[in-house]
Image (cartoon, rainbow, N blue to C red):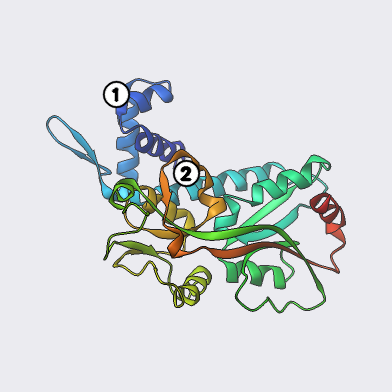
């Protein structure tokens, strides 16, 4: 399959207009429409609802947007790895959570590669438990992870070095039409929908422990449950429900006004972004120097 067809679908979602999307592809609208038809034929179902004088987007296409973007990013990463497979230097393997891979990890990589342009990084994104397992099996040189400040420390022992790169926090936010439903003090109406993490997920555990002591909490009907925080961002932007998200992940949307932070009465859940490495790993000496420098 030509992955550019998926890129066409994303363009169409962004522009919501065939003519504009076709122009960004430097092709005619009929040619662009045929490419969307080709994608639908490959999938085996329509992604658009075509009427006599109008075209609507199916909910399936919008719901799958985060997965499409993630898959294309992974394919690009794989392509880069294959292109560089003949080089002599081994890459520095970083295991991290999905949420950090789209917010803080690029900043860390940038800082550590400025003074070491030959350094190659291989990123492995997983949920927190899987990323930690990869690190403990010595299949990654570095682990970058969120740590809840009110939860027990990770029992790595004295064979592992750690460094708190930055403080962060889970913040309660709304987007879409829900921004206009708030009271004057930015509180939600009763029984407002929420987008929730599974209780067994790491963020789910942190939020569950925290909200037991709060005067206000996000405890309305669950419209969507997902452990994939990158996807939760899209649901919040669509106005599906209120949610807790890392401030570092949603910072740009807060500044632009696309999302609104709820009242201080809901509180903020403090987090640390922590970098771990095995002390026995001889590859990471320069990494630590650049990180702490």
Position of residue 109 in the picture relative to residue 278 (left or right): left
Quadrant of the drawing holding the N terminus: top left
Residue 194, percent across and down? 34, 62
Q: Is residue 5 visible?
A: yes
Q: How many residues crowd around disc 2 within 10 Å: few (fewer than 14), some, or many (20 or more)?
A: some
Count residues near mark 1 (Cα–Cα under 10 Å), then give few for <14, some for 14-19, many for 20+.
few
Is residue 235 positioned above or below 159 on the image? Answer: above
Q: Where does label 2 land, which residue?
A: 253
For the residue pair 239 and 79, the one nearer the viewer reads as 239
From this viewpoint, which residue is outermost toward the left? 52
Badge 1 is on which residue? Answer: 30
Q: Position of residue 87 (x, y in %)?
A: 79, 44
Q: Which percent across, then down, holds residue 257?
A: 43, 41
Determine the residue positioned at 71% across, 66% down.
139
Q: Secondary structure at mark 1?
A: helix
Q: Secondary structure at mark 2?
A: helix
């Amino acid at each position: 399959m030509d992955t550019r067809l998926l890129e066409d679908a994303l363009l169409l979602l962004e522009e919501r207009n065939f003519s504009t999307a076709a122009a960004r592809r430097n092709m005619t609208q009929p040619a662009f429409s045929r490419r969307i038809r080709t994608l639908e034929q490959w999938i085996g179902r329509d992604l658009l609802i075509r009427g006599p004088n109008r075209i609507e987007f199916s909910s399936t296409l919008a719901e799958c947007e985060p997965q499409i973007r993630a898959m294309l990013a992974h394919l690009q990463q794989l392509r880069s790895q294959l292109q560089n497979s003949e080089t002599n230097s081994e890459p520095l393997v970083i295991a991290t959570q999905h949420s950090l891979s789209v917010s803080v990890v690029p900043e860390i990589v940038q800082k550590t590669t400025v003074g070491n342009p030959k350094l190659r990084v291989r990123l492995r994104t997983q949920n927190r438990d899987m990323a930690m397992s990869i690190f403990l099996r010595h299949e990654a040189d570095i682990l970058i992870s969120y740590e809840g400040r009110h939860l027990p420390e990770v029992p790595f022992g004295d064979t592992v070095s750690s460094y708190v790169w930055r403080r962060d926090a889970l913040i309660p936010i709304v987007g879409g039409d829900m921004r206009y439903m708030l009271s004057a003090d930015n509180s939600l109406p009763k029984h407002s929908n929420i987008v929730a993490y599974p209780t067994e997920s790491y963020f789910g555990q942190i939020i569950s422990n925290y909200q037991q002591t709060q005067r206000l909490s996000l405890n309305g009907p669950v419209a969507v449950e997902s452990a994939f925080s990158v996807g939760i961002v899209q649901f919040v932007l669509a106005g599906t429900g209120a949610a807790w998200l890392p401030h570092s992940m949603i910072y740009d949307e807060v500044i632009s006004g696309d999302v609104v932070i709820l009242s201080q009465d809901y509180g903020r859940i403090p987090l640390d972004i922590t970098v771990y490495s095995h002390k026995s790993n001889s590859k990471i000496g320069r990494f630590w120097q650049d990180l702490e420098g």
